Amino acid sequence: MTFTRIDHTAIAVHDLDEAVPRFERLYQTRCAERVTVREQQVEVAFLPLGDTQLELIAATSEDSGVARFLAARGEALHHIAVAVDDIAGELGRLQQSGVRLIDSEPRRGAHGRIAFVHPAGTGGVLLELVETV
Ligand code: CO
């Protein structure tokens, strides 16, 4: 088993410029990084919280999955990301045990390779695997 820790917890927000200072005040932390992930049509901000971090995620396009999520649910918990040592190995293991994947192959995220696991197999919460090595 190579799930090592919660890498980040992600909250979808409408407006990153407004949300970053709001969450900085709420959690008494400072935004460490903002990154645009063009492939996913999102901009994300990372706010360190001890040995994990909060990710605020906003859509950069109306076609973005995050834009559809916000339209349906408003601001809410979007996903939990778990750090793994071997993302390809974990995807293979999950697929073999019948867990529905969104990404059968790793793709590039803000920090290393990532893959999403469908909420149908994870208690209703979108799960991101992140290989940070
Ligand atoms: Co994430």
Image: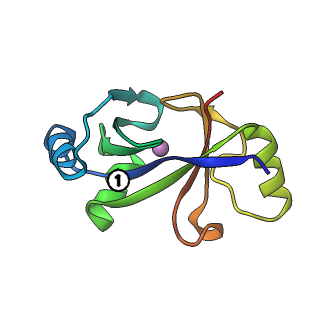
Q: Is residue 112 left or right of residue 13?
A: right
Q: Name the residue rendered at 27%, 60% in the picture.
A: 75
Asked where in the image residue 33 lies, by quadrant, the reply is top left
Residue 86 image offset from top left, x and y in percent: 76, 37
Residue flagged by tag 1: what amino acid is it? Ile
Residue 77 position in % (x across, y down): 38, 61
Q: Which of 41/90 is in front?
A: 90
Residue under label 1: 11
Query: Residue 21 at what x, y percent from top left?
Result: 15, 41
Q: In the figure, 97 relative to 59: above or below?
A: below
Q: Who's the residue at 16% across and 37% down the image?
A: 17
Q: Is residue 23 left or right of residue 68?
A: left
Q: In the image, what residue occupies the spot 57% across and 65% down?
A: 119
Residue furthest to the right = 96
- Badge 1 marks a residue whose secondary structure is strand
> In this orientation, which residue lies closer to the viewer: 96 or 90?
90
**Residue 20 lies in quadrant:** top left
In the image, 62 versus 93, the foreground residue is 93
